[in-house]
Image (cartoon, grey):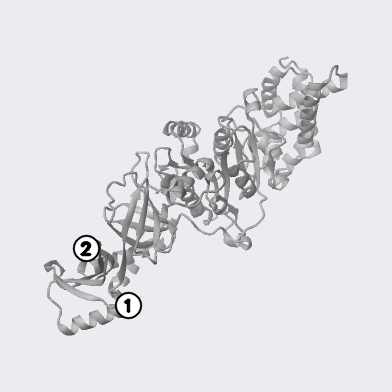
Amino acid sequence: MEHGIQAILYSADPPGDTQKEQLTAFLEKKHNTTVGLIWRSNPALTGGFRIEIGIFAGDPPVWRVRSIYDWSPEGRMRQLKDEINRLSVHNNGNIVPLIKETIQNWTPEVLEQEIGTVLTIGDGIATVSGLPNAAYSEILIFESGIRGMVLELKRDEIGCILFDSDDGDIREGGIVKRTGKTAGVPVGEGFIGRVIDALGNPIDGGGPVKPDGYRTIESAAPDIIDRRPVTKPLQTGILAIDSMFPIGHGQRELIIGDRQTGKTTIALDTIINQKDKNVICIYAAIGQKNSSVAQTLNTLRLHGAMEYTIVVNAPAGDPAPLQYIAPYSACAIGEYFMYQGRQVLIVYDDLSKHAVAYRSLSLLLERAPGREAYPGDIFYLHSRLLERAAQLSDEKGCGSMTALPIVETRARDLSAYIPTNVISITDGQIFLESDLFFSGQRPAINIGLSVSRVGGNAQTQAIKTAVGTLRLELAQYLEYENFIQFSGDLDDTLKRQLTYGQGLMYMLRQQHYSPMSQHEQIITLVVTLNRLFRDVPLDKIHEIKHGILCYIEEQAAYIRQTINQTGELSEETEREIVTLAAAYLKQGAPS
């Protein structure tokens, strides 16, 4: 049972009749209803006061606070502290003069603080009433000190996700306060080479990180006018990708396939290949086992990639809210560098688990389930994340952020809900097939289902010239391979074509964590497409390929220099590569 709005005034001395009338008139005008004012003594509030607005509800009646006016010394100091913190966030230079000016000219205000009440709590979700002005993604603080984020706005209550695995300290009927701050993450140079959690806290034992700023985890994607076309290649070091499905700075290329088909390996190869290329890499591990993340970290450290990489880890043991915000936190860190005019590569591993975490939160928030029990806004969940990847225009600093989202399929089902969503958002996909993987073709890239919608725009002239008809000849070989399953004898021409196609597939095999440089890829393609490996046994192809690369480096190092400096492949250089490779094979390469 509700007993009407009441105001409790706490102060060291009782108010006079005139003060009481003025306070009552102010509160009744503010809340547009009759307000009863009660005074209670609090000797600690000398030189100030505190007013709690609320109701007595229930049987027996229980006091429930709805808002607070805090004019205590502590409240005024808190206002000043918040103002100084605001200055430090928005000013990267020397803020001491600004702080002095603020202290000299600052005037405290009697501000109303909205106070909410916890209705329900459990499974990392709190339902709160009494915060009508709370905003989406706003941070709330519970009386136990636990922080949460508004994720659901209803008419009479809000749904809040909690950033702490232990919600036992929150009780029903407890107090919740607004902060007025949007959920964000600290950013800065100090995070490079570190492992952090979804909230930006270091978890690698390397001590605290001094941030250079603070960015909200969700922000609008760059406008079309602020972008420019994707034209600069971001080389993965993987021959099959760089030659047929190139990735450019600012592109979003999906890596998709069944479990254990090498998706993460492709992402790590790409990160390792960015060494000495002035690219900052961010790896967001979402819902993975800690042992898998530890193995990934060892790989990056072994190849010296942690020097330019940030790892954001929200493992399977973390609450669903942290797994939900992890990719957005990683993206916010990447945007910090992108808007400084720098190049960023970000890997989301993987968005399937991210979608599952969001589905769990949505079901707990009692949202209506849709296809595969996912909420209706699951498409928007990933589109507003991936569309923040961009190649900025010259006016915006020419920075870029390239996104490699990873999605796991089940039994090659590309038509499932999450895969189809992310495929439609991205600029192409690299599809890894389990049959190819277990047959020894690694990376197990399906040539027919993989595509880059940027295409040759993200390739240098040299690689475009060298790749020639590679994809067409591979498609022809795969069609022949399917055809011979239903045919009898083969003529010599078809046999030669099949042998050549097998050689092409073997040539595309590549050891993991062994990226190829641009000139090595070009030499390999030129030698292969000129059919110099036609008579080489399949099991000797890699040995001879390595021998040719070393031989050309010894005999004509200027070829590497020319390709790397100009990014072009002339007819003369191509003929020279063929001549040197033929000479190596003729002089007694292993057979």
Q: Which image quarter is the N terminus in?
A: bottom left
- Any part of residue 273 in sight: no
> Looking at the image, which is closer to me, 410 or 246?
410
Q: Which image quarter is the C terminus in?
A: top right
Instruction: Residue 238 in the image: state x and y as whole percent.
Output: 63, 34
> Looking at the image, which is closer to me, 369 or 194?
369
Q: How crowded is mark 2: few (under 14 residues within 10 Å), some or many (20 or more)?
A: few
Inter-mark Cα distance, 2 to 1: 25 Å
Q: Which amino acid type corresponds to the residue marked 2 in the rendered image?
A: Pro
Q: Nearer the viewer, mark 2 or mark 1?
A: 2
Q: Which amino acid type corresponds to the residue marked 1 in the rendered image?
A: Lys
Q: How crowded is mark 1: few (under 14 residues within 10 Å), some or many (20 or more)?
A: few
- Mark number, residue 340: none
Point out the tag, 2 or 1, that comes first from the N-terminus: 1
Instruction: Residue 382 in the image: state x and y as whole percent.
Output: 55, 50
- Outermost residue to the bottom: 18
- Where residue 84 sits, quadrant-wise, is bottom left
- Mark number, residue 30: 1
Q: Mark 2 points at which residue?
A: 61
- Any part of residue 469 in sight: yes
